[in-house]
């Protein structure tokens, strides 16, 4: 299906549908640009901010606020949070009726926090009406709402729109952080920007070519060129070359490594090799059902997929402590499954068995894991 745009002629009478088509065509064009030339994520702000609090009975908790900001979802839809939005403990409990907790605790494992778009009908315009008019012009408010996911949702794939599609209806979710919730007091106790190997992503760019306009292209990890901020500069002035270094705070980059047009490499520190044949890197810890196990430091998925790294994994279930059954009446826990799939996602659960009645209750549990990454001999 081709993309169409409206065309008008002198003396034509424009209907409301004609004018709405103008707006729809513009939104669709903007969304396609954002979707095909940029990556979804946070563009500005949208950080989780904590304020320490305590109940009158003593337990401490935190009030968490999503700060104002801007994001783009995977359909190209803008998500504008014009004012700070507090996170609601009640809404968390409504969307997580039985949140999984750490073994033997009332505090939950990390739960992802998302923002998503929502269209609502705003107040109608009070403009003058013609003889054929029956009402004033309408408005659609493009609002943003907060949604709490389940463990593992942050790494779940989301549907990709068709190439000619416009902005989505708000079902696409953008990750803005993670929270822990104390089920005993009904309050949040911690927030973070990463959990279980997944981090909040900033909006990015899709490009096969990036060309500088003034003789150089610079990449750095933040907008401000503060002192000490690392940067990668590809330039042609005063001489062609590639420089990696840190900003001095005055706009200049102090070289730590540089390559000139002849391929000569100059470094300021020691040169260390990694990934030699037979070398092994290890990461281990505790993970909950649904979690994707992380890779060891300095090991990337692309190298694993290409066969340059071999992975060996081991997991064992963490059985709930005696007396922690749902009813607390001497039920026995029977592990049913503890494995990881091809995506390194944990599947770990079991049943509480009531010996007197034979009734069972399925429960997700955590496990201890070890991931070894080895470079094959001769690599």
Image (cartoon, rainbow, N blue to C red):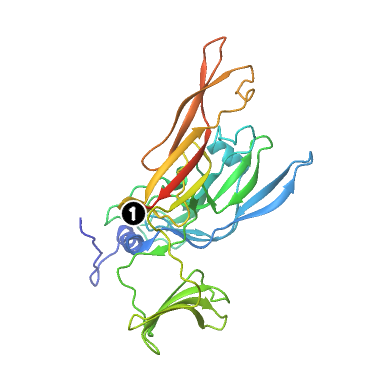
Q: Disc 1 designates what residue?
A: 308
Report whether 18 appears left or right of 185: left
Q: Which residue extends farthest top? A: 356
Report whether 9 appears left or right of 71: left
Task: From this view, report whether residue 245 is shown above or below residue 215.
Answer: above
In which quadrant of the rendered image does the N terminus lie?
A: bottom left
Q: Position of residue 33 (x, y in %)?
A: 33, 64
Task: From this view, report whether residue 108 is shown above or below residue 38.
Answer: above
Q: Position of residue 179 (x, y in %)?
A: 58, 46
The local crowd at label 1, few if under 14, some if 14 to 19, many if 20 or more residues have their Cα within 10 Å, is: some
Task: From this view, report whether residue 67 is shown above or below residue 344.
Answer: below
Q: Position of residue 254 (x, y in %)?
A: 51, 81
Taking the spot 31% from the left edge, 57% from the top edge, the residue there is 17
Q: Which residue extends farthest left? A: 1
Near-viewer residue (92 or 280): 280
Taking the spot 37% from the left edge, 63% from the top edge, the residue there is 38
Task: From this view, report whether residue 302 is shown above or below residue 265.
Answer: above
Taking the spot 34% from the left edge, 52% from the top edge, the residue there is 377
Report whether 37 appears left or right of 11: right
Q: Position of residue 371 (x, y in %)?
A: 46, 44
């Amino acid at each position: 299906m081709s993309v169409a745009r409206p065309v008008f002629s002198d003396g034509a009478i424009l209907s409301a549908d004609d004018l709405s088509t103008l707006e729809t065509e513009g939104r669709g064009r903007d969304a396609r640009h954002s979707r095909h030339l940029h990556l979804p994520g946070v563009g500005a702000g949208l950080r989780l901010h904590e304020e320490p609090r305590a109940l009158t009975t003593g337990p401490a908790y935190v009030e968490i606020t999503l700060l104002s900001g801007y994001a783009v979802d995977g359909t190209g839809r803008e998500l504008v949070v014009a004012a700070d939005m507090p996170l609601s403990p009640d809404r968390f409990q409504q969307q997580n009726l039985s949140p999984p907790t750490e073994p033997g605790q009332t505090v939950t494992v990390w739960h992802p926090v998302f923002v998503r778009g929502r269209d609502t009908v705003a107040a109608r315009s009070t403009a003058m009406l013609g003889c054929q008019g029956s009402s004033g012009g309408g408005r659609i408010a493009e609002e943003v709402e907060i949604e709490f996911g389940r463990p593992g949702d942050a790494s779940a794939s989301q549907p990709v729109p068709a190439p000619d599609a416009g902005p989505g209806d708000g079902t696409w979710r953008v990750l803005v952080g993670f929270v822990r919730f104390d089920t005993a007091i009904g309050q949040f106790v911690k927030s973070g920007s990463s959990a279980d190997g997944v981090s909040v992503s900033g909006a990015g760019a899709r490009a096969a070519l990036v060309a500088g306009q003034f003789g150089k292209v610079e990449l750095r990890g933040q907008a401000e060129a503060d002192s000490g901020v690392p940067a990668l500069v590809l330039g042609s002035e005063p001489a062609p070359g590639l420089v990696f270094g840190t900003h001095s705070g005055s706009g200049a980059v102090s070289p730590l490594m540089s390559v000139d047009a002849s391929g000569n490499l100059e470094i300021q520190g020691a040169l260390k090799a990694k990934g030699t044949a037979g070398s092994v890197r290890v990461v281990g810890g505790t993970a909950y059902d649904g979690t994707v196990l992380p890779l060891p430091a300095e090991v990337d998925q692309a190298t694993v997929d290409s066969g340059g790294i071999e992975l060996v994994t081991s997991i064992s279930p963490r059985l709930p402590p005696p007396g922690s059954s749902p009813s607390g009446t001497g039920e026995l826990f029977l592990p049913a499954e503890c494995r990881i799939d091809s995506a390194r996602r944990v599947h770990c659960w079991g049943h509480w068995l009531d010996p007197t009645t034979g009734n069972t209750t399925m429960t997700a549990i955590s496990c201890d894991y070890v991931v070894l990454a080895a470079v094959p001999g001769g690599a």
